[in-house]
Each structure stands twice: as C-alpha cells, then as structure tokens.
Image (cartoon, helix red, strand yellow):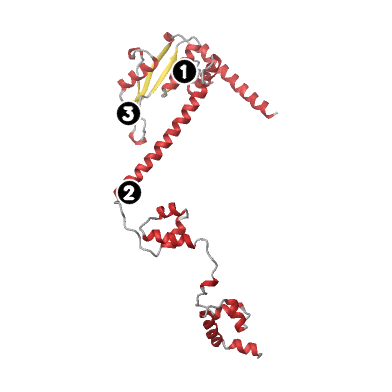
Amino acid sequence: MTPETSRYADFEGLRRQAVALRREGLSLRQIRDRLQVHNNDLLHRLVKGEPPPDWTRRPNAKDDLRARARELRLEGKTYDQIQVELGCSKSSISLWVRDLPKPERKRTREEASAIARRGWEAKLRIREEERQRVKRTAAQAVGALSDRELFLLGVALYWAEGTKDKPYERRERVTFVNSDPGMIRTFLAWLDLLGVEPERRTYHVMIHENADVVAAERYWAEIVDTAPEAFGRTSLKRHNPKTGRKNTADGYHGCLTVRVRGSADLYRRIEGAWCGIVGAASAAVRGNRT
C-alpha cells in the first residue's frame, strides 16, 4: 500500500479535515490542493452536506427578481400582480414564494366573478367591433354592380339555392327558397334585371308550426313589397323539440319560396349560363398555370 493509498484509506480523518477547511471558507479547489486529494468523486464525498462559502457562488441573474417577488408576496400581492410588475413567469414566481403564506382574499367569490365577467364582456365588445369593422370595409369595397355582374351573381345564387332539373324528374321551372332576406332581395333584383314581371311571381312561406305564422307572413310581405293576402298557402313544418333547433325563437321567420310561372325557358337559360360560368372559371384556372 502506497502512502497516498494509505492516506485515502483514512476517510474519516480526511473528512474531518475537509469539513474544517470548508467551514473556514475554502473552495473545493483550495481543499483539493491543501489535502492533495485529486479524485473529484472522493473530494465531493469528503465535503458532502457542507454548503459552499458565499464567495464561491456564481451570481444569478434572477436573484434580485426572486427577492423582489418574495417582498411583493409578503405585501399580499397575487401571482398575477407579481407577474405584471416583474415580467416573469408564474411558474418561477410559484417556486420562489411557495413557502410564504397566501395573501388574504380581498374580494368575495361573487365579486371576483363579477369583475371577471365585466372583463370578458369588454373583450367580447372589442371582438364585435372588430367583426363589424371588417364587414363594413368589405361591403364598401363591393361598390356598384354592373348588369353583367348582377346577372352572373344571380345565376350562381340560383344554382346554389334554387331547385334543379333531374334526369329522373323533369323540373324545368324556377323555384327559389331561402330564409335570408338579403338573398331574397338579391334574387328579386335579378328577376327585375331579366324582365320577369311581378305578376309571374308567386310567394309562400315555409315555417315551423309552433312559430308566429301571421307575423312571419307580414315580415316576408314587407321584404317582397306586396300584401300578405297575395301569398299562397303557408306550409307548416312539424316541430320536433328533441332536435334542439335554435332557430324557432324570436326573430325566426321561416323560409320564403319564390316561384316564377311559365319559367321553363328561363330555367334552361340559367342552367346554360351556369355551365358557361363553370367552363370560363376552369379555363381561367388553366390559363394561370401556364
């Protein structure tokens, strides 16, 4: 056994010396050089449980934040308030102050809920204002429609919402059904453009049986600018409460059906124009790829 090996064998003696030096304020490197212990694992075992002297600790950029967070917590501040003031994460704040007592609640749960609700309502108002601003900007960007633009729009509108002819059931007649008064007004403006006289147009309401039928008839009569007596018989749809429909309360007016008498030729023109739109759109796409 070499003298050095023999000295390492006296672990307890070395530990007593290392601990004494540690308490005197020496660093690990100084203890290593003083005791000539060059095995790092052994060196750490010799001083295990003894905190390093303050002068050997590296400064931590968050030490000041931690100290300030603890001060604010002792003043009764919440995590949110501390986060706003210091700009650090709640997870860090929680680690720094978790041993401190929680501040007393300054508001009842009802008061806190009311404050939160007011805050949420303010956010909703801001969102709604932004939503309406975008809509107004988009509406203003449309400007005036040319006859050609209105014609193409009406064809697309009808092909999306109107009845279509089927090979197994010929339906070459123009029938348009919708619940949106804007859609109805646009469709009627399109019929005016095509010279379809008001006398050739018939109307009737389709609505759930538990709704205010008379009010709905008056509503649609005002939309199409005619008397309710001029409407055909209203179609009542059976209401099933199990479906959980939400469009049968106040403001619900059902759908309006607009039919054009003697409209087989008009229907064929619509279908032909729609085929022309599809072909032109496809050609435009192909042209953009070349």
Please, what secondary structure does the residue beneath circle 1 have? helix
Image position of 239 (left or right of 48):
left
At a point 39% along the width and 36% down the height, the residue shown is 125
**What amino acid type is highlighted by mark number 3?**
Asp
At a point 62% along the width and 81% down the height, the residue shown is 33
- How many callouts does the rendering have? 3
Using the numbered discs, state the Cα–Cα distance from disc 1 to disc 3 in whole angstroms: 25 Å
Q: Where's residue 56, x and y in %?
A: 55, 72
Return the mark for residue 187.
Answer: 1
At a point 40% along the width and 53% down the height, the residue shown is 81
Foreground residue among 149 and 65 = 65
The quarter of the picture where residue 94 lies is: bottom left
Foreground residue among 92 and 224 = 92
**What amino acid type is highlighted by mark number 1?**
Phe
First in sequence: mark 1 vs mark 2? 2
Using the numbered discs, state the Cα–Cα distance from disc 1 to disc 2 in whole angstroms: 51 Å
Marks 1,3: beta carbons within 8 A? no
Q: Where's residue 122, x and y in %?
A: 38, 39
Report the quarter where the C terminus lies.
top right
Q: Which residue is mark 2?
A: 112
At a point 59% along the width and 23% down the height, the residue shown is 278
Q: Is residue 168 visible?
A: no
Q: Which residue is mark 3?
A: 250
**Crowd class of label 1 (few under 14; some 14 to 19; many from 20; radius 10 Å):** many
Please, what secondary structure does the residue beneath circle 3 have? loop
Foreground residue among 37 and 210 = 37
Q: Where's residue 8, x and y in %?
A: 60, 86
First in sequence: mark 3 vs mark 2? 2
**What amino acid type is highlighted by mark number 2?**
Ala
